[in-house]
Image: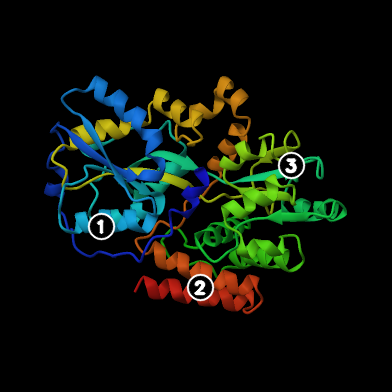
Amino acid sequence: MIGALALAGCSSDSSSQSGGSADASQASEGASDRGPITFAMGKNDTDKLIPVIERWNEEHPDEQVTLHELAGEADDQRETLVQSLQAGNADYDVMALDVVWTADFAANQWLAPLTGDLAVDTSQLLQPTVDSATYNGTLYALPQNTNGQLLFRNTAIIPEAPADWNALVASCDAAEAANVDCLTLQLKQYEGLTVNTAGFIEGFGGHILDDSGTPAVDSAEAKAGLQALVDAYSDGTISASSTSATEEETNLAFVGGETAYAINWPYMFTNAGEDSSAVKDNFEVTPLVGQNGVGVSTLGGYNNGININSPYKATARDFIEFIVNEENQTWFADNSFPPVLASIYDDETLVEKYPYLPALKTSLENAVPRPVSPFYPAISKAVQDNAYAAINGTKSVDDATADMKAAIQNAAG
């Protein structure tokens, strides 16, 4: 399920620079060497990669890729990888990393930078996905697949798509008249709350961290975004049920015809179109809306990193590049695994089969990765704790953003 990618950032506290130190010579070891490699990935999505691995193995009999399935839960996946990397092991040559882990693993010098002999061409990939794999100006992983949020709309209740956030708020009168909620999204206190808080902050011109990595949640723009979220929950634009909603509760509410709008990941498109859906033939998807037009989705997905200790980095490099070729990225699109190759979203045959692709492309082109920081888990907790308090009225937006900033600063030491 694509929506599960939204949860993949719920990882345990960063090990933050602990162990696994490497120097430039270690990074270059094996850069020209070839041989069999192991690819590690969480088991929830390996069905998308098995055919890709089989194709590679048919073409490279002397450089076979063995799949190692990690646990389904993100915390357990990360713990397994960290334990191996801290010990300096080469158990896994290539690792499918949640986008929010990439900076952490790079900061710990567990990943071989994709420079020199390991350089790859990223010019055909969606730029935000490349940004998510970049740390301190250096590419440390190659995007594999991505994900972006969409605005789902019940067209029987609200025929026209809103142009911006204010237009969405104004259209809620139609939802009230139809006796349904206006907008449902994920505001339960978990990673989904971080994702949606970041979307509002970015959608109103703010940032959680600025370009230098400094907390920026107390800027006027960031406060405006959080205030818009708080006001929308307070005045009923956002459903009361949203503070207990994950992706699945959101899915059930929209597919069940209980809400006029929903923010969710592309997997919900298939569910909404099924015969059992209350909105079958009466829904559309568009990019999120922000203060002045198209809004900002948080980026999901996986980045493939090469273990600094891999003895066969040349094979590892070619394998991660193989994953993003046109054939394999088309396979991803055909299996609800949003690709990173930009041209796939313009394939007329695919668009006919999956009408949400143009909206998803716009969403992804305007998406922003979650804060690229080795301290991401602590940042996410700071956002969740304080946004939840503001939404529920136990903190003012000023106090919530001040406390959020202080907690982020403390996490970074």
- Look at 16% across and 55% down and name the residue there: 22
Element under disc 1: helix
Residue bearing mark 1:
82
SS of the residue under disc 2: helix
- The one of 80 and 194 positioned closer to us in this rendering: 80
Front of the two marks 3 and 1: 3
Evaluate if marks 2 and 3 touch, with contact meaning CB atoms under 8 Å apart: no
Q: Amino acid at mark 1?
A: Val
**Residue at point 39% right, 35% down?**
47
Q: x, y percentage for residue 68?
A: 26, 42
Residue 360 image position (x, y, % from top left):
58, 38
Residue at 72%, 53% (x, y): give it: 165
Amino acid type at circle 3 is: Ala
Question: Nearer the N terminus, badge 2 or badge 1?
Answer: 1
What label sits on residue 278 in the rendered view? 3
- The quadrant holding residue 388 is bottom right
- In space, the residues marked 2 and 1 are separated at their CA atoms by 27 Å
Callout 3 secondary element: loop
Image side of residue 154 versus residue 375, left or right? right
Q: Is residue 132 above or below residue 58?
A: below
